[in-house]
Image: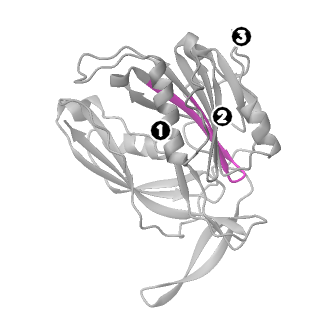
Amino acid sequence: MRKLTISTHYLIVFLIILTNCSPLFAQSPNYSVSAKWELYSVKDQKVSFLMPRLPVLIEQKNECMGEVSQNYAAYTDGAAYVVKITSKVNTPEYCVVRKGFDDNNFAQRIKYVKKELKDESKTENNFASDAVIKLNGAGVLVKFINDYKNKRWIEFAIYGADEKRDEVIKFLASLNSDKTAAGIEIGQGAERTFGDDSGIIEEFKFEKDGKTETGKRMLVKINDSAGIPARIILKPRSNYTDAARKNQVQGKVVLRVTFQANGAIGDVSVIAGLKFGLTEEAIKAARRIVFIPPQRDGARYSITKPVEYTFTIY
């Protein structure tokens, strides 16, 4: 788990997705929306880009480095598509170490992603204010567009799809940054991660406590027999509520989340909760997790996992 360090007297939330999981789940809605590639817009950024459906919006703040990011993400056909816009913000007074936004922010981001992807391409001399850089890793492609004139950069990332796929090519080339930013306005994005409408529900037998029981699961048939585990792409942080802050509430919310074969976040139930709206905030965040479903024996399949949110006051 990546740990975020910040000055004292500040509220922060950590998300842990626990390792134990189960392929079982009760029959539930598919939470599906047919994929239809259309142009979507972010009005305040004056940009638009292609997405297969209305994306979720996941914000990430690194204010002590003078930057904030908006991640727009959607899943379709075994792949996750993410557009990340990182912009300049004023550095708060509470930061122990304060750094303003400059061209080094972009350079540091490139170096970090290169290390994560184990990309060995030579990019060190290509950090110009209008640079376009592509990095590749195992099942990941990221295109960076530096827009330092507007104190920002934009990333187009694809997880789980070959870059030769027609929709990938169109997605990478879809950025429109003129003043009109035509397209369907995203606003606050989808309330949950929706999946494709190709899933089927089947019954299967399994052993539990020495007994044979019957369960139901979703499957999506594919022409690929490889075994691939589930892959979490984006994990939204949960928000503290004012009431919980006022009452100094700390602790954990543990949820049981269904990661469906069609790429949707399915039912979310509570294993252990907290008062003053923290359980509800954790559920809202969990519904917007972006992932790639696991697959084996020619099918993607659904699993359930405990997801833990820890609320701590520093």
* Disc 1 secondary structure class: helix
Q: Which residues are magenta?
A: 68-84
* Disc 2 secondary structure class: loop
The residue carrying pointer 2 sits among few (fewer than 14), some (14 to 19) or many (20 or more) residues within 10 Å by Cα, namely many
Write down the residue under mark 2: 54
Rendered image coloring scheme: one colour
Question: Residue at 25% of width from left, 16% of height from top?
Answer: 93
The three-letter amino acid code for the residue at tag 2 is Leu
Q: Position of residue 194 (x, y in %)?
A: 62, 45
Image-based side of 45 in relation to 199, left or right:
left
The residues tagged by marks 2 and 3 sit, at their Cα atoms, a distance apart of: 19 Å
Image-based side of 294 in relation to 170, left or right:
left
Q: Main secondary structure of the magenta part?
A: strand
Write down the residue under mark 1: 112
The residue carrying pointer 1 sits among few (fewer than 14), some (14 to 19) or many (20 or more) residues within 10 Å by Cα, namely few
Seen in the picture, residue 207 relative to 186 is either above or below; the reply is below
Question: Residue at 52% of width from left, 40% of height from top?
Answer: 113
Q: Position of residue 54 (x, y in %)?
A: 66, 34
The circle drawn on residue 237 is none
Q: Is residue 156 magenta?
A: no
